[in-house]
Image (cartoon, grey):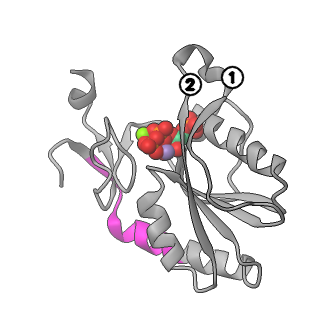
Amino acid sequence: MNQDVKEILISEEKIQSKVKELGKLLSDEYASTLPLCVGILKGAAPFMADLTRAMSIPLEMDFMAVSSYGASTKSSGVVRILKDLDSSVEGRDVLIMEDIIDTGLTLSYLIELLKGRNAKSVKVVTLLNKPARRKVDLVPDYCGYEIPDEFVIGYGLDYREIYRNLPYIGILKEEVYSS
Ligand code: PRP
Ligand code: MN
Ligand code: MG
């Protein structure tokens, strides 16, 4: 285990079995629709890589990178698009893939944006959900695990850009982020 991890919250084995289960479910739901799977960089990258390989249907992959505006306007939920999609979503069944939903501000903005571009449907699959931190009413369509309000890292989730490559979800030691 990484020395900065206090406790493993979700093991690699549990993540992988959940990903397989979600992959089967989504393969049924999106069979014959050629979904456009949209990963939100950078956190979603490991989950998307595993989840799409657990989906046994034709699909397309595309990516967006976003960033919140400064602290003063964060509650507005407006996000800045750093990298937009390459593809048009018009008439497409869009499946957004995320590592975690926290306040929900990032996703609620993106969902409205993609609906406004006339996607046929916009749904969300997230590995983790932290409902305790929610600021807007947003319920994921598909979710791996609901987690408590702890500082989690690994499997895409970072602290100052590090730890994304851990194969499990860990709780970060307080001494790491309080110093
Ligand atoms: C994290 C996470 C989600 C978002 C969730 O990304 O990966 O995308 O925050 O937060 P919210 O529900 O409060 O909007 P972050 O902005 O840290 O970028 P990263 O994916 O590059 O780490
Ligand atoms: Mn992210
Ligand atoms: Mg981050």
Ligand 3 appears in which quadrant? top left
* Residue sitting nearer the eye, 49 or 104: 49
CA neighbours of label 2 inside 10 A, class few (<14), some (14 to 19), many (20+): some
Q: Does 26 sit left or right of 92 as displayed?
A: left
Q: Position of residue 142 (x, y in %)?
A: 65, 61
* Type of the residue with mark 2: Tyr
| Quadrant including the N terminus | bottom left
| Residue 16 drawn in magenta | yes
Which residue sits at x=76%, y=67%? 93
Q: Which residue is mark 1?
A: 76
Q: Which portion, as a residue range, is magenta?
A: 7-20
Q: Which residue sits furthest top?
A: 72
Q: Position of residue 101 (x, y in %)?
A: 57, 44
Which residue sits at x=28%, y=48%? 163
Q: Nearer the viewer, mark 1 or mark 2?
A: 2
Q: Is residue 21 visible?
A: yes
Q: Which residue is mark 2?
A: 69
Q: Does 130 sit left or right of 1 as displayed?
A: right
- Labels 1 and 2: the sequence-earlier one: 2
* Residue sitting nearer the eye, 152 or 119: 119
